[in-house]
Amino acid sequence: MAGDLIIGVDAGTSVIKAVAFDLQGRQVAVASTPNRVLVGPEGAAEQDLDGTWADTAATLRVLGERVPDLAARTVALAATGQGDGTWLVDAEGRPVGPAMLWLDARASRHVQALRETPASRLIAARTGNALNPSMQSGQLLWLQAHQPERLARAASAMHCKDWLFFKATGVRATSPCEGVYTFGNFKSLAYDDETLALLGLTAMKHLLPSIVDGTQSHALLTRSAAAETGLREGLPVVLPLMDVPLCVLGAGGVAFDAQGALRHVGCSVLGSTGMHGWVTDNVAAIEPSAEAGYTIAMPSPGLRVRLVSHMAATLNIDWLVRLLGSAAELAGGTALPRAQMLERLDALVLSTAPAQAVYHPYIAESGERGPFVDANARAQLSGFSATLGVAGLARSVFEGIALATRDCYAALGPLPEEIRLSGGAARSVALRQMVASVTGRPVRVSHREECGAAGAAIMAALSIDSHASIHQMLPQWVDAYLDEGVAVPDPQETTLYDQIYQQYHETAQRTRASWGALADSRRAHLDATAQEMR
């Protein structure tokens, strides 16, 4: 039994999970701890660095309580985490204030100003990515303008996974992921001086950690980190990519045909946010957009994943559930438990007619970032009459999430031959069918419970040479968890949704000016109110 487990950690925005896998990819046990987001003025969204590490260590200790002899049996540890954001650390390894998360909207104006210059297209061409407020580049510009004293104290600008790796090993490093797609060249997978100059961040180059390939190297767990986590000193610790590309890997987004050629398979991760894309081995053919999207290295030579994300996926269903619960309470009743409400909604959506209204699911307070970037974007319901009831409203919300999915894929090019679906929304039969009919593509669900942690564990297995390649690992670690059943598009509904989609897309583009005017009115009102209070 000795040496038969790999631990993958996924430090998400709201939950930190530690998962033990055996060497065949089977999940042995999982432990989790809620993560805390500190919300502040002007769109601030932060986390405490020391708190995030302490919670990660505590989660690993709980995992140790659930798995006999975990420390002795573990051959490697890899911790991925939420992407983007800015985690500043000083020369002594102490946090320099709280981390700015990918949710933080304070850099929006700085990023928008840069997007309106010719540099925006040049940056996208080099990095493979469109500028958005989630990225560390815009947050560094905001810090430079508003909190320069913090930058003066900082020695390293890390991301979540980099911070966890540093606390575990004492090594300052990052992967060929956020650092490259923000400050580098997506072809060379290295930092790029011209990119830094275009961003206006040349003076901050010293903050960027060294780039290491976690599939080729690892560091060792320090004595202090071993004491905190309950694992053994000297355990190989791997620095993986951030969570999204690893979710794509773990959910089946890398697929080969019988001849070994890469298939054009889509992968959608529908959680609180929605992430959609596909993996390519034709790097030379990638044409990045300055409007929206990511180009991210995968943990296999020559592979990149092209991704477009929308800020709110199941957040829209959460809103719908709260709305219906409030309506029930207003009528003198009691709101149903969430799980029961979701089950009823699924059945209701499937039983009612399609396209009774058109819903744009831009419900996130920070606006939208895919397939366009607009911090002022807001959700809207249109095209309905007095006959619209709860069933039609619910179906419109589900359709809106599926339409946003198609909109993101359309921004990348031709729709994939098949879509692999994961995330919390993958459990919804109704949403699976909506995605299939709206895109006109079959949808297959991954039943892998923790795709991000599994992707991290795959990288760890490659790093310690327990497996030769991702290609070799896919059958047991990934393909075995794909549902044999497939959600097939309804031909009549697909014909209807083809027409609805065009209106959906064009309406969003036409409404952007109105969102901006509405945001200006709200800001003016808030400023006037604040002035009166003084």
Image (tube, rainbow, N blue to C red):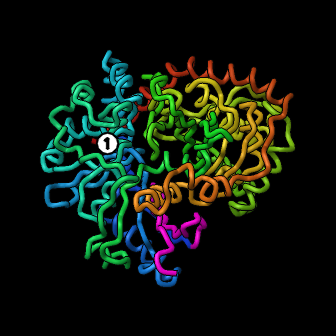
> Which secondary structure class fits the magenta region best?
strand
Query: Residue 373: x, y in percent?
Result: 46, 28
Query: Residue 322: x, y in percent?
Result: 64, 52
In the displayed structure image, the side of residue 433 where residue 284 appears, left or right: left
Q: Residue at x 40, y 53 (%)?
A: 215
Choose between 41 and 17: the one closer to the eye.
17
In the displayed structure image, the side of residue 108 where residue 266 appears, left or right: right
Q: What residue type is labelled 1?
A: Met
Q: Is residue 14 magenta?
A: yes
Corner quadrant of residue 120: top left
Query: Residue 403: x, y in percent?
Result: 67, 32
**The C terminus is located in which quarter?**
top left
Do we see residue 516 in this rendering?
no
In the displayed structure image, the side of residue 392 where residue 475 appears, left or right: left
Q: How crowded is mark 1: few (under 14 residues within 10 Å), some or many (20 or more)?
A: few
Q: In this view, does 140 lie above or below 214?
A: above
Corner quadrant of residue 169: bottom left
The residue identified by callout 1 is 533
Corner quadrant of residue 233: bottom left
Choose between 80 and 114: the one closer to the eye.
80
Choose between 155 and 219: the one closer to the eye.
219
Q: Which residue is drawn at 44% across and 32% down?
A: 375
Q: In this view, does 505 lie above or below 77?
A: above
Q: Residue at x 17, y 50 (%)?
A: 154
Q: What stretch is highlighted in magenta?
A: 1-28
